[in-house]
Amino acid sequence: MLKAMKQPKGFYKGVFALMLPMILQNVITQTVSFADTFMVGLLGEQNLAAVTTAVTPFFVIMLLMMGIQSGAGILISQYWGKGNLNAINRVLGVGFYFSSAFSFIGAMLMFFFPEFFLSIITNDAEVVALAVNYAKIAGFAHMCNSISGVYIAAHRSMENARLGVVVLTLSSLINVLGNWLLIFGKLGFPAMGITGAAVATLISRIVELVIVLIYAAKNKRFKIIPKSLFKPGLVILKDFLKYSLPVILNEALWGFGAMIYPIILGHMENSMVILAAYTISGNIERLFGVAVFAGGGAASVIIGREIGAGRKDTVYSAGKALVMLSFFMGLASAALLFVATLIIMEPYIFPLFKLSEAAAEACTIMLTIMSFVMIIRTVGFTMSIGVLRGGGDVRAVMYIDIGSLYLVALPAAAISAFVFGAGIAVVYGCIALEDIIKTILSLFRFRSKKWINDVTREAVA
């Protein structure tokens, strides 16, 4: 595998040109998420648990959006390799239609029936009551993001990852400022608590959408073709469904399954403490794991571009180099998370959230377990979401993802929690089994070379 890291001149320059903006974008996103969690955490564990409860249903919507973006990205990156901008406009148009529809349905369901869905997640009536207004407002924020997110992801698939950094930096700054003003009632604004956090998020998403629309109108590198965008045609629709539907189904089923994790935790003894710890540890884990998503995103674009450009003979070698690179990034991320958990988090960070001793202990346990799983997760994500999907092998990735979750991790977590009454260390360890099984299965598929597929057409009109 180390020999595979010897790639043509300029290969790693191209990889890091994609990865670094993605890492920066993820750092910004996760830092803002951490800041949000911190400010809400100042209101107390109950408010923190309420936000966790409110955002859990939208986790499914978010994953559907990611599925649409990833599915469209498979086609876009390969058409980018061919230089076919008309086809990219058509794929983008289909992506817009699907993402808008899903986000609208999700927003309406949470606006009119929030208590029903939130009560499924936790049996704490006070937490549900606090979460209702947040959930109602958050749906409209996701509607705005359904448009801007697809457009930003399309540019990322065309090797323009810097757009996401600029747009999300601006919207994130607005979000943080809005949180400070509206959660605590600063500078004459009303103190709205967690409802203020939802309003701030909505405002930032509206600004994000406006920036994207202006950029799309003026951008010369990729010009919008209205006829192709709004009337994509049946040919691209069929290709989109063929390659994107498994991805969307993958993300939807994985999202529903992953949503069961906080439901399991929310029905354990001392659930409010565990949910608060789960929220904080999740934010910290994602902040230290930014290389996971950047490695997978860059791999998908590079593999798709190489296949679309007709360089199938070098794709497997490039895939091996990307996997090895992800191993070293995962090793570094794991070491940083482990050291930070032991030295920084418990004495300095957790007290800022006013966590109880029990919540701080649960948070430490979760982060310690994840620090050992981080290397495996990074390699698995690059292989499955990056290389295999980039090569158009979407069905295999779906089977691996869903099988690891539903057949291994969820049953193990549920049985350990409700049958054996295990503590958070055992239950969270069972949750981590998902990444281990997923990586092993992805490795077998990667070595088969069956994932290398050209998904483009010569004529798409």
Image: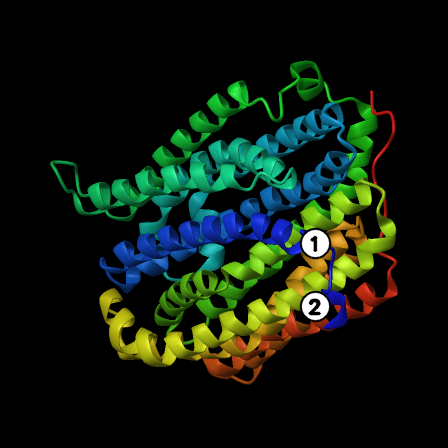
- Image x and y of residue 168, in percent: 43, 40
Q: Is residue 294 above or below residue 169?
A: below
Residue type, label 1: Lys
Question: Is residue 318 something that shows in the picture?
Answer: yes
Q: Nearer the viewer, residue 197 or 339?
A: 339
Give the quarter of the figure containing the N terminus: bottom right
Q: Is residue 453 above or below residue 202?
A: below
According to the picture, the residue beneath numbered tag 2 turns out to be 404
The tag earlier along the polypeptide, 1 or 2, is: 1
The reply to whether callout 1 and callout 2 are in contact (CB within 8 Å) is no
Secondary element under disc 1, as helix, strand or loop, is loop
Q: Quadrant of residue 50?
A: bottom left
- Image x and y of residue 299, in percent: 67, 54
Q: How many marks?
A: 2
Secondary element under disc 2, as helix, strand or loop, is helix
Q: Is residue 113 left or right of residue 441?
A: left
Give the quarter of the figure containing the C terminus: top right
Question: Is residue 297 something that shows in the picture?
Answer: no
According to the picture, the residue beneath numbered tag 1 turns out to be 9
- Image x and y of residue 395, in percent: 80, 53
Residue type, label 2: Ser
Q: Is residue 386 left or right of residue 31?
A: right
Q: Is residue 296 above or below residue 359?
A: above
- Image x and y of residue 148, in percent: 52, 33
Q: Is residue 60 left or right of residue 443?
A: left
Q: Looking at the image, which residue sits at the far left?
A: 188
How many residues crowd around disc 1 within 10 Å: few (fewer than 14), some, or many (20 or more)?
A: few
Q: CA distance from mark 1 to mark 2?
A: 38 Å
Q: Nearer the viewer, mark 1 or mark 2?
A: 1
